[in-house]
Amino acid sequence: MASDESQQPGEGAGVSVPLPLDKLCFTHSQEGQPIVLVSTGSFNPPTILHLRMFELARDDLTADGYSVLGGYMSPVNDAYGKKGLLPAHHRIAMCRLAAADSDLLMVDPWEALQADFQRSIKVLKRIQQGVNAARPEGMPPVRLMLVCGADLLESFSRPGVWIEAQLREIFADHGVVCISRGGSDARRHIHENDLLFEYRKSIRIVDEWASNEVSSTLVRRFLSRGLSVKYLTPDSVIQYVKEHKLYTPSHSKPMDENGAGLSSRTSTKDNAVERKAEAALILTP
Ligand SMILES: Nc1ncnc2c1ncn2[C@@H]1O[C@H](COP(=O)(O)OP(=O)(O)OP(=O)(O)O)[C@@H](O)[C@H]1O
Ligand SMILES: NC(=O)c1ccc[n+]([C@@H]2O[C@H](COP(=O)(O)O)[C@@H](O)[C@H]2O)c1
């Protein structure tokens, strides 16, 4: 299905960003259909559960004969405007630190560096193009799958949040790996929603049997109260947070303090200028 197919890898509405490819394990491709995983989100900050999602998804797909070549975290654009969202350069830096120890995870800063909010389908298409352009000759096309928690799956049926045609494209062309999460019943949600039910075969539900109550909200709350977050997020992220004095009570104020709108999905001019200035720095891993 068509969606920005004309867009070249690394090219968006704003800053051109190379796709990191260093951890992609192209040699796995002989073992099964090649898959690359992508998770979009705030990652504010990344937690161990964000990292776990990729491990769970890889195990589940591998057990069914797929070959997972790598994975990407794509931090959301500042214009998403979620309350307390730190500027993208901090979230990109923390995601990179969190991904450093992973054998499959990379961070694609493209979405965060664009002039405006980007729909997830665009992120999937961009990474799909970049990965396939780099794949060795003779390898079958690599499929990009969206990895998410059950709460994100629930948002698919929230009016005005997603575009139905794009959801159909995500299901039909990519597929979703949905990780169970306390408070969300993914199976029931699929049963109760006609669109999700229609595409139920494109949604893999993976149960996390270890306790997974950790969220970025919890980590931010602990940090703003001066409490320990050790074992909830990697030590390198904790170090970064300390060095940059993030998630102190002043950082937890709504986004306008940081230069972006609260809930409108458009960025200010100042934000765009700042983002361009930061881009050179961010593009260097
Ligand atoms: N504990 C978890 N279990 C399953 N999925 C999770 C978990 N934490 C995050 N995710 C998933 O990771 C993706 C990115 O999430 P996000 O950055 O919004 O984290 P979050 O912890 O939900 O954030 P916040 O608490 O700030 O709302 C989403 O698909 C979300 O569902
Ligand atoms: N239509 C869309 O493509 C769409 C809608 C809502 C959220 N999203 C993405 O889902 C993620 C949700 O992140 P949070 O769970 O932190 O709100 C973000 O990366 C956001 O870009 C995409």
Image (cartoon, rainbow, N blue to C red):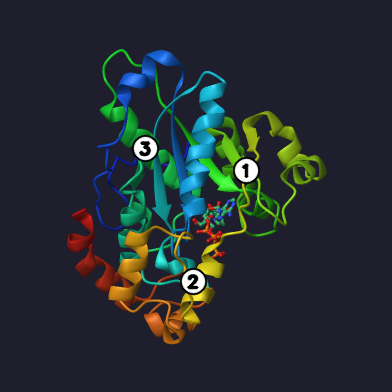
Mark 3 near ligand 1 (CB under 8 Å)? Answer: no
The reply to whether residue 1 is visible in this rendering is no
Q: Secondary structure at mark 1?
A: loop
Mark 1 or mark 3: which comes first in sequence? 3
Taking depth in this image into account, of 215 and 167 the one nearest to the observer is 215
Mark 1 near ligand 1 (CB under 8 Å)? Answer: yes
Q: Position of residue 45 (x, y in %)?
A: 44, 64
Looking at the image, the residue that sits furthest to the right is 192
Mark 1 or mark 2: which comes first in sequence? 2
Residue 32 located left or right of residue 272: right
Which label sits in the foreground, 1 or 3?
A: 1
- Binning the other alpha carbons within 10 Å of mark 1 as few (below 14), some (14 to 19) or many (20 upward) gives some
Q: Could you tell me the amino acid type at mark 3?
A: Leu
Mark 2 or mark 3: which comes first in sequence? 2
Q: Position of residue 107 (x, y in %)?
A: 34, 49
Say which residue label 3 marks. 104
Q: Could you tell me the amino acid type at mark 1?
A: Glu
Q: Secondary structure at mark 2?
A: loop
Q: Position of residue 272 (x, y in %)?
A: 30, 70
Which label sits in the foreground, 2 or 3?
A: 3
- Binning the other alpha carbons within 10 Å of mark 2 as few (below 14), some (14 to 19) or many (20 upward) gives many
> Image height check: is 52 above or below 68?
below
Q: Could you tell me the amino acid type at mark 2?
A: Gly
Alpha carbons under labels 1 and 3: distance apart: 19 Å
Residue drawn at point x = 47 percent, y = 54 percent: 48
Say which residue label 1 marks. 208
> Image height check: is 140 above or below 188?
above
Mark sitting on residue 188: none
Q: Secondary structure at mark 3?
A: loop
For the image, the number of numbered tags is 3
Say which residue label 2 marks. 81
**CB-based contact (under 8 Å), mark 1 and mark 2:** no
